[in-house]
Image (tube, helix red, strand yellow):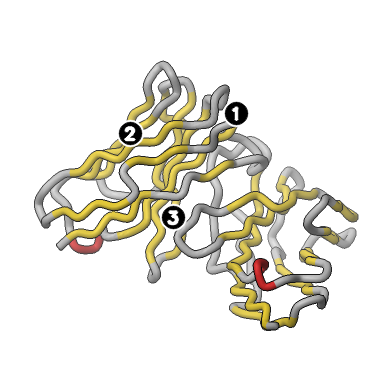
Amino acid sequence: LAKTTQPISMDSYEGQEVNITCSHNNIATNDYITWYQQFPSQGPRFIIQGYKTKVTNEVASLFIPADRKSSTLSLPRVSLSDTAVYYCLVVVSNDYKLSFGAGTTVTVRA
Amino acid sequence: KAGVTQTPRYLIKTRGQQVTLSCSPISGHRSVSWYQQTPGQGLQFLFEYFSETQRNKGNFPGRFSGRQFSNSRSEMNVSTLELGDSALYLCASTAFGQGGYGYTFGSGTRLTVV
């Protein structure tokens, strides 16, 4: 299973764009990159998943370069409510579990 | 539609006791998985069930067990509780349990062992 490395913490201000980069050097051909968000005392929430290039949904964008050894989650115009822990996961398409790392604590200030 | 429901939300138990936690998945979801979250170890996978069969198990001692019923509801049991079992126990449901997509987590059961 590919190990992921992401920054421990990031600070931002309301209205700014936050980019979290995750490295996954040993990603395999069948693996997907998935991001989850977790607020204190709640379960993680699925944000976005991608295989290559760019994926965008209503809350975030995910950029994956051609070599797929890293990925960047982009949160546009963050607000105080985006303060949370963000997890980057590499998931095998036929795996039955999620393997979480330490995550990135994003703190948004007014 | 209703989300994943975990009961109870909070629990205090004494060392040596056993505990049973319950998880009701989203209607139609047949895969239920369990995770333990602690400040030191983070989120760790316990086990996953699909149609009443355990398909995957994490690296936890045999004191941790689970089961799934025909209506997809799941329970996990921890016997002979230890102080280190104090954690937030999270349950997640998904339609098929593969690929990391679309897992919906409950709010968890906070277990404190004293």
Q: Which of A58 and B47 is in front in this view?
A: A58
* Tag 2: amino acid: Glu
Q: In which quarter of the image is the N terminus of chain B?
A: top right
Residue positioned 61% across, 72% down in the render: A104
Q: Between marks 3 and 2, how big is the CA–CA gap?
A: 17 Å
Instruction: Identify the chain of the residue marked 2, using the numbered disc in the image.
Output: B
Task: Name the mark nearer the viewer: 3 or 2.
Answer: 2
Q: Residue B96 carries which label?
A: 1
A60 sits left or right of A24 in the view: right
Q: Which of marks 3 and 2 is nearer the N terminus?
A: 3
Q: Position of residue A96 (x, y in %)?
A: 55, 38
Q: Earlier in the sequence, mark 2 or mark 1?
A: 2
Q: Between marks 2 and 1, how big is the CA–CA gap?
A: 18 Å
CA neighbours of label 3 inside 10 A, class few (<14), some (14 to 19), many (20+): many
B75 w.r.t. A107: above or below: above
User: Which residue in the protein does label 3 denote?
Assistant: B44
* Tag 1: amino acid: Phe
Q: Residue A66 carries which label?
A: none
| Mark 3 and mark 2 on one chain | yes
| Mark 1 and mark 3 on one chain | yes
Q: Which of B13 and A99 is in front in this view?
A: B13
Residue A26 found in image quarter: bottom right
A78 w.r.t. B13: above or below: below
Q: Earlier in the sequence, mark 1 or mark 3?
A: 3
Quick one: SS at disc 2?
A: strand
* Tag 3: amino acid: Gln
Q: Do the residues labelled 2 and 1 touch (CB within 8 Å)?
A: no
Residue positioned 89% across, 59% down in the render: A66
B24 sits left or right of A89 in the view: left
Residue positioned 90% across, 55% down in the render: A53
Q: Where is residue A44 in the image (x, y as percent from the top left)?
A: 56, 54
User: Which residue in the protein does label 2 denote?
Assistant: B75
